[in-house]
Image (cartoon, grey):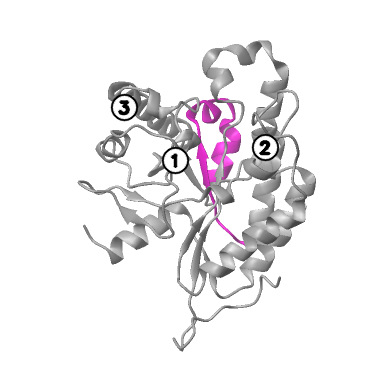
Amino acid sequence: MDLKASTDKPGAGVLQQATLALAFDLDGPTGDAMLSGSIWNKPGYFGLGAYGPHRAVPRILDMLAAHGVKATFFTPAWVVEHWPGLCRRIVAEGHEIGNHGYKHEVFFRLSAEEQRSILNRSQNIFEDTVGVRATGFRAPSGDWHPQTASLLAECGFSYSSSLRNGDVPFRHDGHSLIEIPAKSLFDDYTAFAYHRAPNFPAGLDRVAAYTPVFESWGEEILAAVPEGLTVATIWHPKVIGTPGRALLLEKFIGELVENPGIRFETCDAIARHWSERNPA
């Protein structure tokens, strides 16, 4: 598969482009075990999560800089508090930092007031620590309450990249919030994240061979070019940022950068450009 080759829409006479958002969920050690408190008795859980901000993200940032590509990092505010230097580097190098809750909470289990409290607390931490308030939000685990979209608009967010229901951005009914869908097939957990201790994700029993996964992602991205679709990834630094996977990721991005049919944008830029073309 040649990721460098352009793809023209038959009969159009002009080059079509797909928009690609390299979106990383920088969860660190947040999640269910932290929310329950059990993580503090399970060093394996903490170490597995901390690998992302401690080792993988610097590797990924160097890679992105080498190719001149900007990405979006959806980050729980607890991670911003505990790795402030890293998060400042993300912003200083021109990448976007997006809201991902405080400790990767499951929003569909929370009341509207609990959700609002988490969103506002996280935004304040972002502003105090890295000097920006996130314009976008990704629901931890992709699940949210029916009220979450309206709460995001109320709290000043311009977009979400939480749902898995489309190929192009759209505006939620009743308010200005834009959705940038992301497909589960671009979630690296489905291929690479199995760990025996802790046993997560439950039910999986092997890790996929690396190269075929990247080939599948490449095929989906190239297929998005003729229709001018938007692709947003769901990559986790602690999963995709190990040395072997990062090596293939660098090759993957490098080949896509050379394809004139692929336009790289942060999620914030995608939302802004889409809103300009589709005013409310």
* Residue occupied by mark 3: 116
The answer for how far apart the CA atoms under marks 2 and 1 are is: 17 Å
Quadrant position of the C terminus in the picture: bottom left
Examine the rendered structure and indicate whether residue 46 appears above or below residue 72. above
Please rate how many residues cluster around mark 2, counting C-alpha atoms within 10 Å: few if below 14, some from 14 to 19, many from 20: many
Q: Tag 2: residue type?
A: Lys
Q: Which residues are magenta?
A: 68-91
Which numbered disc flags the more N-terminal residue, 2 or 1? 1
Q: Secondary structure at mark 2?
A: helix
Which numbered disc flags the more N-terminal residue, 1 or 3? 3
Please rate how many residues cluster around mark 3, counting C-alpha atoms within 10 Å: few if below 14, some from 14 to 19, many from 20: some
Residue 241 inside the magenta-drawn segment = no
Q: Tag 1: residue type?
A: Arg
Quick check: marks 2 and 1 in contact, CB under 8 Å? no
Please rate how many residues cluster around mark 1, counting C-alpha atoms within 10 Å: few if below 14, some from 14 to 19, many from 20: many
Q: Position of residue 81 (x, y in %)?
A: 52, 26
Q: Return the mark for residue 127.
A: none
Q: Tag 3: residue type?
A: Arg
* Residue occupied by mark 2: 238
The answer for how far apart the CA atoms under marks 1 and 3 are is: 14 Å
* Residue occupied by mark 1: 138
- State the image quarter where residue 137 is shown: top left
- State the image quarter where residue 29 is shown: top right
